[in-house]
Image (cartoon, helix red, strand yellow):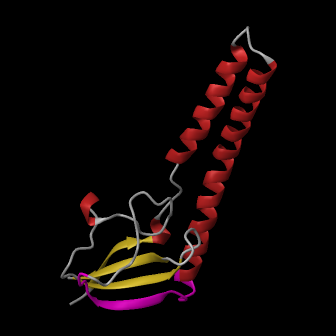
């Protein structure tokens, strides 16, 4: 029986949605500036919102790209740790649909491929985003 790869971090890209929040801050700041009756405090809030928006639009994708690059290098250089076996209730990797990471984070409740009883091979390393956690870089499922 062969393994089929169902997740590979090297196939992941940058998730752009969080940067949309930055655009929202910029627009909010511009609306505040456009108000004619703005006070000095309101202008300060507007400039702060614009600054946060710009930093979010640049910083979030840069942070994500650096993590994608780092995790790809771990896989390409064969430095990932590997565990093989049947998924059993109680053997844990911590991941969540709500983590902002290029590593695996698709829970079975949201259509993810990991289910109890599957024979898998998981490549992982220490997470860069979440101290003390492991980042799943690749998942192979036995066919």
Q: Residue at x 50, y 63 (%)?
A: 101
Rendered residue at 38%/83% (across/down) = 122
Q: Quadrant of the C terminus?
A: bottom left
Image quadrant assignment for residue 23: top right
Residue 3 at x, y = what percent? 28, 84
Number of labels in the image equals 0
**Which residue reaches farthest top?**
36
The residue sitting at 38% across, 90% down in the picture is 83
Q: Nearer the viewer, residue 132 or 7?
A: 132
Is residue 76 located in the magenta-colored stretch of the structure?
yes
Task: From the viewer's side, name the closer residue of 43 and 108.
Answer: 43
Left or right: where 133 falls relative to 61: left
Residue 79 on image: x %, y %: 55, 89
Identify whether 32 is placed above or below 22: above
Q: Depth check: 45 or 16 in front?
A: 45
In the rendering, at what x and y percent does residue 71 appear? 55, 74
Residue that lies at the very extreme toward the right in this rendered image: 40
Q: Nearer the viewer, residue 68 or 32?
A: 32
Q: What x and y, as percent, mark residue 65?
A: 61, 61
Q: Quadrant of residue 85?
A: bottom left
Q: Is residue 102 left or right of residue 51?
A: left
Who's the residue at 65% across and 31% down the image? 26
| Quadrant where the N terminus is found in the figure | bottom left
Q: Is residue 76 above or below residue 98?
A: below
Q: Which residues are magenta?
A: 75-89
């Amino acid at each position: 029986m062969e393994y089929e790869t169902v997740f590979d971090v090297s196939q992941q890209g940058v998730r752009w949605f969080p940067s949309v929040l930055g655009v929202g801050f910029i627009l909010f700041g511009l609306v505040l500036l456009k108000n004619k009756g703005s006070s000095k405090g309101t202008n300060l809030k507007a400039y702060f919102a614009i600054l946060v928006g710009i930093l979010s639009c640049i910083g979030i994708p840069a942070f994500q790209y650096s993590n994608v690059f780092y995790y790809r290098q771990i896989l390409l250089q064969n430095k990932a740790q590997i565990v093989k076996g049947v998924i059993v209730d109680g053997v844990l990797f911590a991941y969540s649909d709500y983590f902002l990471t290029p590593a695996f984070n698709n829970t079975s409740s949201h259509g993810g491929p990991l289910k109890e009883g599957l024979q898998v091979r998981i490549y992982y390393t220490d997470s860069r985003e979440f101290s003390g956690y492991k980042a799943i870089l690749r998942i192979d499922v036995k066919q």
